[in-house]
Amino acid sequence: MKTPCEIFVWDILPMIRKEFAKNLIKDHGYTQRKTAETLGLTESAVSQYLSKKRGKKDILDQNLQKEIKKSVQKILKGNTKTVVVETCRICEFLKANQKFE
């Protein structure tokens, strides 16, 4: 059985990053390079998120999708610290809504 920290590192964090990257690129016209800079990732990591080599799980829950979009809006106006804060906020949202499995 995986610990909550293992689940976060292996499943949840990649899923959140993938959704942030997809949203920045598809909804806001960011390039992979600008997305990587904004999220504090490498371009190759962003490429892997988009090709589902990382972050293979998809978010189907509409409420969670709305929260991701809210986070991206804050990230657009913030800095790398905002990315950390919003990643943690999404994780807390998942835990509070018992979608942390």
Image: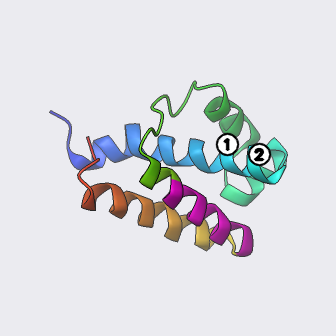
Q: Which residues are magenta?
A: 66-77
Q: Which residue is mark 1?
A: 22
Q: Magenta span has 74?
A: yes
Q: Residues within 10 Å of mark 1 (few under 14, many from 20)?
A: some
Q: Nearer the viewer, residue 9 or 73?
A: 73
Horizontal side of residue 52 vs 95, given as left or right: right
User: Which numbered tag is attached to residue 39?
Assistant: none
Q: Magenta span has 54?
A: no
Above or below 7: residue 92: below
The residue drawn where x is 46% and y is 48% is 62
Residue farthest toward the left in the current orientation of the protein:
1
> Are the residues tagged 1 and 2 within 8 Å (C-beta)?
yes
Horizontal side of residue 44 vs 86, given as left or right: right
The residue drawn where x is 46% and y is 40% is 59
User: Residue 49 falls in which quadrant of the image?
Assistant: top right
The residue drawn where x is 64% and y is 71% is 74
Q: CA distance from mark 1 to mark 2?
A: 5 Å
- For badge 2, the amino acid type reads Ile
Horizontal side of residue 3 vs 72, given as left or right: left
Q: Which residue is mark 2?
A: 25
Residue 58 image point, x, y percent: 48, 34
Tag 1, which secondary structure? helix
User: Residue 3 falls in which quadrant of the image?
Assistant: top left
Residue 45 image point, x, y percent: 66, 37
* Total count of labels: 2
Above or below 60: residue 92: below
Residue 37 image point, x, y percent: 76, 56
